[in-house]
């Protein structure tokens, strides 16, 4: 599936100028885009591991990208499930549609990432691109949006774009995350918070009344979206408010309960240099405690002028496709078995026993207090 791309010297010099091969401008590479260090001896540093991962993505042929895209097009929920413990696939509680939830700070690039998904995965038909926060309408940042980025009847996953979290009001944002993970999500579901104006909250509530007619979906995998440029500014200034907010989201108990390893997507444009991008990714992965190669994907969603990126960037295109595929693979491995009649009987019996034990514990506490008061009364009389 993977074959190295062969370029002439003229083409290679042109590729070094593009955003797709930005890391080849680092000192570890020569003028031909090859490693200077001897990496055959092993014991690679995290920096070289990251550069090798970028090289791997660059060496993916278009046939490999089309093959992985075809797998996503024909994917149905549960296709990547692996039988364990003698349990059959028919005994598993697999939803009809796998739900991927995008969570991140305000302006982290969630809507731009959805647009890039449409560019890479949505190959035909009318494509309803997501509206970014820079556009005049404001309902897109306040209502949950369900996106079916692949126009296929066989496809079985959707992506939810959510309202961004404010790093100065993380308590309100984490309450929304807990609600999404525990109660599920709906299309056009309002995301009102206490810091919003009463008039805006009324408008968003009226606009979200039609959300009840849409199906409520259980979140299967979370993709934490972070802006690499904001993280770089934090590491440069020493004020780690954005990094700490990302860490709070990534290690949220509600997310960890359903996803042991949420995916980290780093969005960026063309402002940072290759050295700055590599160092920022390494520092951010170290602060989150994840692998610098398999735990995060950096994807160029916007160009320097703020225009959404096109599919012409093969590295970002395959990184996005692989991230979605890995999210579906992780989701299919977290399905639970269906509850049978015997399970419901045992759950009801345990609930009844818990009620009896709570009742007798209350009686014991009451009579112990009554007996203690009676004893003190007798002492006073004597």
Image (spheres, grey):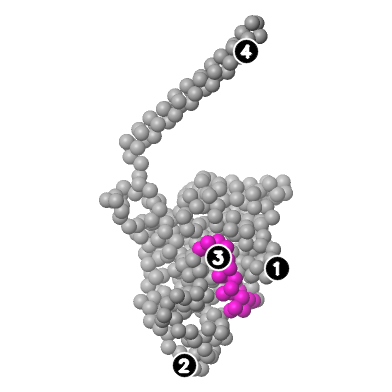
Do labels 4 and 2 touch, CB within 8 Å? no
| Residue placed under numbered mark 1 in the picture | 237
Q: Outermost residue toward the top?
A: 382
Label 1: which secondary element: helix
Task: Indicate left or right for 352 with 171 as reference.
Answer: left
**Is label 4 or label 2 in front?**
4
Q: Residue at x 65, y 5 (%)?
A: 381
- In 3D space, how far apart are the residues under numbered discs 4 and 3 (Cα atoms)? 62 Å
| Residue placed under numbered mark 2 in the picture | 8
Specify start and end residues of the magenta stretch as a single range: 269-290
The tag on residue 376 is 4
Is most of the magenta stretch helix, strand or loop? helix
Q: Outermost residue toward the left?
A: 86
**Is label 1 or label 4 in front?**
4
Question: Which x, y percent locates residue 218?
Answer: 47, 50
The tag on residue 44 is none
- In 3D space, how far apart are the residues under numbered discs 1 and 3 (Cα atoms)? 18 Å
> Against 17, is 339 above or below?
above
Specify which label sits upstream in the sequence, 2 or 3.
2
Query: Crowding at label 1, few (<14), some or many (≥20) Cα neighbours within 10 Å?
Result: few
Magenta stretch encompasses residue 206: no
**Is label 4 or label 3 in front?**
4
Do labels 2 and 3 touch, CB within 8 Å? no
| Residue placed under numbered mark 3 in the picture | 286
Do labels 1 and 4 touch, CB within 8 Å? no
Q: Which quadrant: the N terminus?
A: bottom left
- Whether residue 267 is visible: no
């Amino acid at each position: 599936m993977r074959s190295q791309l062969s370029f002439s010297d003229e083409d290679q010099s042109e590729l070094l100028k593009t955003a797709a091969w930005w890391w080849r401008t680092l000192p570890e590479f020569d003028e031909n885009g090859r490693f200077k260090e001897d990496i055959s001896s092993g014991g690679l540093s995290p920096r070289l591991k990251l550069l090798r991962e970028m090289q791997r993505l660059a060496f993916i042929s278009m046939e490999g990208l089309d093959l992985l895209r075809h797998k996503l097009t024909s994917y149905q929920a549960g296709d990547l499930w692996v039988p364990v413990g003698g349990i059959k696939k028919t005994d598993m509680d697999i939803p009809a549609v796998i739900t991927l939830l995008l969570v991140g700070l305000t302006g982290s690039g969630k809507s731009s990432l959805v647009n890039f998904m449409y560019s890479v995965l949505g190959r035909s038909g009318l494509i309803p691109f997501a509206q970014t926060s820079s556009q005049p309408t404001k309902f897109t940042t306040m209502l949950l949006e369900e996106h079916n980025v692949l126009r296929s009847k066989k496809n079985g996953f959707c992506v939810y774009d959510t309202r961004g979290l404010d790093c100065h009001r993380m308590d309100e944002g984490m309450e929304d995350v807990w609600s999404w993970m525990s109660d599920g999500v709906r299309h056009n579901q309002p995301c009102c918070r206490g810091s919003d104006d009463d008039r805006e909250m009324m408008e968003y509530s009226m606009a979200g009344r039609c959300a009840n007619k849409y199906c409520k979906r259980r979140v299967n995998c979370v993709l934490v979206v972070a802006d690499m440029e904001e993280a770089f500014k934090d590491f440069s200034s020493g004020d780690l408010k954005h990094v700490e907010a990302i860490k709070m989201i990534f290690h949220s108990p509600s997310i960890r309960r359903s996803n042991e390893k949420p995916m980290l997507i780093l969005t960026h444009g063309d402002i940072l240099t290759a050295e700055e991008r590599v160092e920022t990714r390494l520092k951010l992965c170290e602060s989150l405690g994840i692998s610098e190669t398999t735990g995060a994907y950096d994807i160029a969603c916007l160009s320097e002028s703020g225009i959404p990126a096109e599919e012409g960037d093969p590295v970002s295109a395959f990184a996005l496709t692989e991230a979605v595929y890995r999210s579906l693979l992780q989701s299919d491995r977290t399905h639970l078995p269906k509850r049978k009649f015997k399970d419901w009987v045992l759950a009801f019996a345990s609930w009844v026993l818990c009620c009896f034990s709570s009742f007798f514990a209350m009686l014991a506490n009451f009579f112990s207090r009554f007996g203690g008061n009676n004893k003190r009364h007798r002492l006073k009389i004597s």
